[in-house]
Image (tube, rainbow, N blue to C red):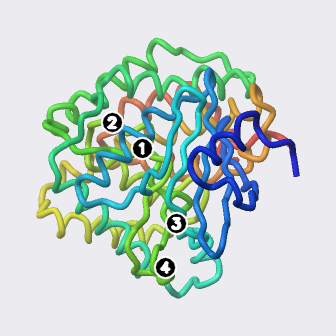
Amino acid sequence: MSALPQGLTEFIAHAGWADAAIAPLPGDASFRRYFRLTRAGETAMLMHAPPPHEDPAPFLHVAHWLNGHGMRGPAILAQDSAQGWVLTEDFGNDRMRDWLDDHPADELAAYTAAVDAMADLHRLPPGPFAPYDLAVYQREAALLTEWYCPAQGLEVDAASYADAWDEVLAPLLARQQPGVTVLRDYHAENIMLLGGKPDAPQGLIDFQDALVGHPAYDLVSLLQDARRDVSEALEAAMLAHYCKAAAIEDDAFLADYARLGAQRNAKIVGIFTRLDRRDGKPKYLAMIPRVWAALERDLAHPALAPVARWFDANIPESLRAANGAFAA
């Protein structure tokens, strides 16, 4: 076991878990660390999100809002935001991703439940979070030109890239008013199946970056998953299921789904490149072809024409044919 963070034993003692066994858990792409505490058949999750790299306050803010509105974020058992400590309810080990790896026949049931949870969230008034506005969309989309293009040795026209996104996103902005709570990383690795079955209630995690924006965004996160293959047939079926649940009948929603799909996938390609080049985490490069393939599908929608023209002019066909992969 690697060394425990300073202050851990003092925090759990103050929280009433001094006698618990401590087991570190695999981390994610951030500076956060996670531990499972166990005592007398009872468990809890300990998150360390240490300043200055992390701040648990946004996680706590969103968790309290979700739980106060009937959604299932983990209950907060103890906290010390200044030192980066949060003790929460343990949702167990049944991540949707892991469950489907072992039970692939349950895929339709699990995704239907996940889409239903999104529909429930979107029926609520938007939370007290910052807006997912054009400046945020642009900052995220720019990660592709800031990180991916230089890493591939490409000199591109970043100004016209931003102009293309302005044109593509403008029609969407009015349609995301008053908006819904957008968790921003809603996918099979961040959904817990609390009842140990595919149609169990959805336990939500990794939602600290929530904003108020468009209802299609989290559907893109779920159905164009960077970490797991989702067939185009399942994607189409779940989009139709959501539209029925939300009483959406116009084509504008599907156009906005493609807009946000392209924006999110461009962002992820940039983030995964940054994780390799800046943070020394090369494992994310292997996911870029999956993300790039989804990006190409989104770019084929007529609503993306200005951005698609930019890609045609700036990204070589040979690289696109390789689904954006880096040379071995």
The mark nearer the N terminus, 3 or 2, is 3
Instruction: Using the numbered discs, state the Cα–Cα distance from disc 1 to disc 3 in whole angstroms.
Output: 20 Å
Nearest-to-viewer mark from 3 and 4: 3
Residue 298 appearing in the image: yes
- From the image, tell me which residue sits under label 4: 107
Mark 2 vs mark 4, CA separation in Å = 28 Å
Q: Mark 2 and 4 residues: CB-CB less than 8 Å, in contact? A: no
Q: Residues within 10 Å of mark 3 (few under 14, many from 20)?
A: many
Residue 52 as seen in the image, left or right of residue 206:
right
- At 53% from the left and 15% from the top, the residue drawn is 157
Q: Amino acid at mark 3?
A: Phe
Mark sitting earlier along the chain (2/4): 4
Disc 4 marks a residue whose amino acid type is Glu
- In the rendered image, the vertical position of residue 240 relative to residue 143, given as above or below: below
Horizontal side of 100 relative to 276 (left or right) equals left
Determine contact: label 2, label 1, CB under 8 Å. Answer: yes
**Upstream in sequence: badge 1 or badge 4:** 4
**Residue at the location (26% across, 71% down)?**
241
Q: Is residue 282 left or right of residue 109?
A: right
The image's mark for residue 184 is: 1
Nearer the viewer's eye, disc 2 or disc 4? 2
Question: Horizontal placement of 190 versus 125: left or right?
Answer: right
Q: Residue 211, which numbered label?
A: 2
Q: Nearer the viewer, residue 72 or 120?
A: 72
Residue 40 pos. (x, y %): 65, 73
Please name the amino acid that badge 1 sits on. Answer: Arg
Which of discs 3 and 2 lies nearer the camera? The answer is 3
Assign a secondary structure to mark 2: strand
Residue 147 x, y percent position in the rendering: 65, 24
Label of residue 163 in the image: none
